[in-house]
Image (tube, rainbow, N blue to C red):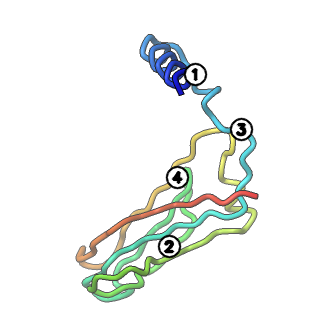
Amino acid sequence: MRSFRGICWTLGLVTLLGGSLSTTARAAGIAPTAITFAINHADCGGAGAQTFDLFLNDVRLATVPSSQGCVCNTEPLVVTFTDPATLELFDGASCNAFRVDVGGGSGNLVLAFVRVAVSTE
């Protein structure tokens, strides 16, 4: 544990001093088998009044309608992508950006959480 702290401290110091260790910190060769968005929300305009645009690396993957009305709930909207065209957008040798934009409706939407899971073999 002590040596791990020393490594972290050293990496932090090198980064602070202007060194770049980003290539060593990246996980290379990750090949996803599925990408899953989970969105827990309440749509007070009614289920389907709002939409969610799901993005990976600034590419819109899908637009999906809200699935819950104006109630507290524990069942998120879950959308999973397994098609090769979508999975190829994931860069296993770099950082990836995931985004959810809200559109349509009157703005009466409450988000509890948005979670993205990347599954691998």
Question: Would you place residue 118 above or below residue 95 in this image?
Answer: below
Q: Nearer the viewer, mark 1 or mark 4?
A: 1
Three-letter code, disc 4: Asp
Q: Position of residue 26 (x, y in %)?
A: 63, 34
Q: Position of residue 27 (x, y in %)?
A: 66, 38
Three-letter code, disc 1: Leu
Q: Position of residue 111 (x, y in %)?
A: 32, 69
Question: Which of the 4 image quadrants contains residue 100?
Answer: bottom left
- Label 4 – label 3 distance at C-alpha: 21 Å
What residue is shown with label 4? Answer: 58
The secondary structure type at the circle numbered 3 is loop
Kindly identify which numbered label has been placed on residue 110: none
Kindly identify which numbered label has been placed on residue 28: 3
State which quarter of the image contains the C terminus: bottom right
Q: Nearer the viewer, mark 4 or mark 3?
A: 3
The secondary structure type at the circle numbered 2 is strand
